[in-house]
Image (cartoon, rainbow, N blue to C red):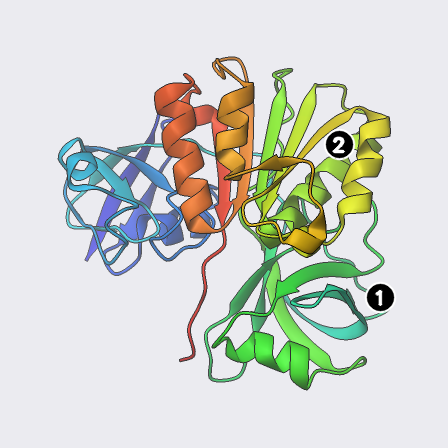
Amino acid sequence: MTFHTTLQPSGHSFDHPELETILEAALKNGYILPYSCRDGVCGACKGRILQGRVDYGKYQATTLTDAEREAGMALFCCAKPLSDLVIECREVNSIKDIPVKTMPCRVQSMARPAPDVMVLKLKLPASERLQFIAGQYIDILLKDHKPRSFSLANAPHDDEFLELHIRNIAGGEFTRHVFETMKERDILRFKGPLGTFFLREDTDKPIIFVASGTGFAPIKAIIEHALHAGIKRPMHFYWGARKLADLYMLELAEQWQSRGIRFTPVLSDALAEDHWQGRTGFVHEALLQDYADLSGHEVYACGAPVVVEAAHRDFTAQRKLPNEAFFSDAFTFVPKS
């Protein structure tokens, strides 16, 4: 059975097979809705059902609460239609014309800036380039396994190689392969670019970036793009980690300060040998201490879901950040199939 879905406030509409999620159908019809994990975890695709009924699908209860469901909210990466629909959502227009490709690539280099972080640089075939927007991600395609999603850490103007920052996750089959058996010149396949985590450039609002761990990767890409493009909006970057070694490109982030990017590193569990004299605690709480009112800002948050969720909750509830001014990319772990 096919239903009809209308997007508000744009008025765009499309036919919608009942077995496809709202997000899948919108993307197939050329309408880009915000999304990241596509697995009911990050909440980036949350919107409101104005008319009609949906099967809400499987998702994390903390991402879509019972109260939010009663208020008409749904996660469009999970929800499927049970009738014609009218939904309220933000549309992202600036990535419509970027093709999503499946491509081979070669591991050009491997470097460990920290014991549990690997920086991969991937080289495309000689005649190919990947068109993308800073902040997007790619899916590494593995035979007989779920794809693994990694943010691109390089900006589009610096696209000779695709740069990925990979943390060694306990129990992670692919990350174990990266750290134990992968070699330079190995061949991988990927699909991309994907995601709607990128800098909105149609406003002059001050920008706050919040990253935890390797959530630094897409923030790095966005900041490098902003500097290259000469964007003059005030920017403040908060990077949270457990210990000093986890700030694995600290010198680079510090260098950005000379170009006008305020930088606040925060450690939650510094080691004695770190001799840390900087901010401590949780990274989003450091921002709460520094900003009494976020109503005129945009926030871009990336990293562990618990960090992104806490940031969204507290910034909107306690610091008047408009919901539509919070952009996120929550890293989710895909267990062994």
Mark 2 against mark 1, which lies toward the viewer?
Answer: 2
The quarter of the picture where the N terminus appears is bottom left
Describe the element under mark 2 as helix, strand or loop: helix
Which one is in front, 58 or 28? 58
Q: Residues within 10 Å of mark 2 (few under 14, many from 20)?
A: some
Q: Which residue is mark 2?
A: 226
Which one is in front, 255 or 53? 255
The quarter of the picture where the C terminus appears is bottom left
Q: Are marks 2 and 1 in contact (CB under 8 Å)?
A: no
Which one is in front, 43 or 276? 276
- Residue 203: x percent and y percent? 61, 18
Which image quarter: residue 256? top right
Q: Give the amino acid at mark 2.
A: Ala
Q: Is residue 313 left or right of residue 174?
A: left
Q: Is residue 26 visible in this depiction of the protein? A: yes
Residue drawn at (68%, 86%), measured in percent from left and top? 181
Residue drawn at (47%, 77%), measured in percent from left and top? 171
Q: Give the amino acid at mark 1.
A: Ser
- Residue 309: x percent and y percent? 39, 41
Decide which of tag 2 and tag 1 comes sooner along the chain. 1
Describe the element under mark 1 as helix, strand or loop: loop
Q: Is residue 7 left or right of residue 262?
A: left
- Residue 134: x percent and y percent? 68, 43
Distance from label 2 to label 1 (Cα)?
A: 27 Å
Q: Residue furthest front?
A: 272
Q: Is residue 321 left or right of residue 195?
A: left
Q: Which residue is mark 1?
A: 127
Residue drawn at (45%, 42%), measured in percent from left and top? 308
- Residue 98: x percent and y percent? 63, 48
Q: Which mark is residue 143?
A: none
